[in-house]
Image (cartoon, rainbow, N blue to C red):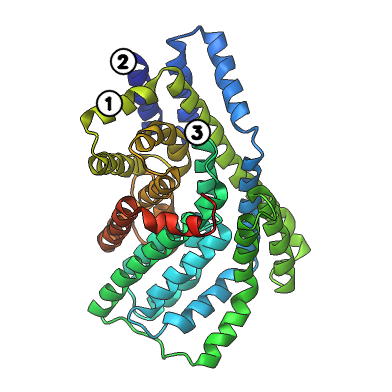
Amino acid sequence: MEFLPVIILVLSFVFFICIGTPVAWSIAISSLLTIIVSIPLLPAVTTIAQRMATALDSFALLAIPFFILSGQLMTQGGIADRLIRFAKTIVGALPGGLALINIISAMLMGAIAGSAMASASAMGSILGPEMEKEGYAKQYGAAVNITSATIGLIIPPSNVLIVYSLASGGVSIAALFLAGYIPGILTGLFLMIVAGILAKKHHYKTFKRSSLNEIVHSFLIAFPSLLLLVIVIGGIVGGLFTATEASAIAVLYSVVLGFVYKEIKFNDIPKILLDSAKTSAVVMLLIAASMGMSWIMSYENIPQNLSDFLLNISDNKIIILFIINILLLFIGIFMDITPAVLIFTPIFLPVVKTLGIDPIQFGIMMVLNLCIGLCTPPVGSVLFVGVGIAKTSIEKVIRPLLPMFFSMILALILITFIPQITLWLPRIFNTI
């Protein structure tokens, strides 16, 4: 194994990140510096540009800007208020009622909007002040919001799972979407248990128990929003349309719903389109740069060499999965989830396939693992959003975050070593 390309790739990437270069540019420049070792400058630049452009030439990737747009429309369309009202009638009377409302609402919002950032922003803005008014510690509320917001990246429709499908060479998006439900609900349940224990310990207030009529009424109000999940996932699983077509339908449904709720006006559309375009551009640039780096790594035989190295350590599935999880947890601390999935899927997937692990199970395991990284400094984007909205500091939030981390890691361990948690639903619907 030649170590020079690996050394150049790693050191240059770390250097550019440390001096504040945007992640996408850090990936692209370090990839260029790496390939210059093997071929002349002009062909190297041409090759990188070609690989970045080719990476975006994918019908499946069209789903991402559409889901981003539908998420923006849903966020603007007053969906969060209706979901919070529904969640309040279900768990408001339990210990830490507002925290549990935050978690359930974030799960529903994340599933509908498909964005951890949108979920953290919406729930933090609405529930944060209310939690503080009811006597909840600001840091506790921020920790609950930050960790629960990431669950939407596991529960479909999820842009990250679409990215994993691309990076893995075409794993079924329908199967990945179905596989995300039980792990996402399990993670949310663990967070709720921890949040409830902490709330009881600090004697935080609860709401009065809702009547059946109140529950039914709030459900009917939230039902049109929840119906989007049935339309999108049901259509994909039933073979009525592809994930890309489903994303376009989600946009159309979100627009209609926003006007029906009278939360969106024609004057709002240009700003929503502009915000969606900005977010989509950032994501697509990350995907292009990351796919370019993946090609460079493949050209230099880095994934194959690392795979051989891991398999030489042990052929025990438990040990290898433990090592991969530790590496992914470390990677998630320093790298955003989209480039991490694109870069490291081609490295680790051949290893787990050799050990007989289903790519669908590995995809959910990888995404949940990297979701934990979104809540950790120094690159945790959801952490910074949650802290900013709560008007507190990272140092103050770390302590209440720790038990939340442990609950997410417990869910990760179960998902890693019990394949049925992930694969049960896809098998029932014959998608694998």
> What residue is rendered at 40% in x and 19% in y?
301
**x%, y% of residue 366?**
39, 45
In this figure, which residue is indicated by the disc labeled 1? 309
In this figure, which residue is indicated by the disc labeled 3? 24
**x%, y% of residue 65?**
64, 47
> What residue is rendered at 53% in x and 79% in y?
85
Q: Earlier in the sequence, mark 1 or mark 2?
A: 2
* The N terminus lies in quadrant: top left
In this figure, which residue is indicated by the disc labeled 2? 1
**In this picture, is 147 found above or below 45?**
below
Crowding at dot 3, Cα within 10 Å, few <14 / some 14-19 / many 20+, comes out as: some
Does the image show residue 391? no
**In this picture, is 367 found above or below 27?**
below
Report the residue that reaches farthest toward the right.
266
> What residue is rendered at 60% in x and 56% in y?
237
Q: Give amino acid for label 3.
A: Ala
Q: Earlier in the sequence, mark 3 or mark 2?
A: 2
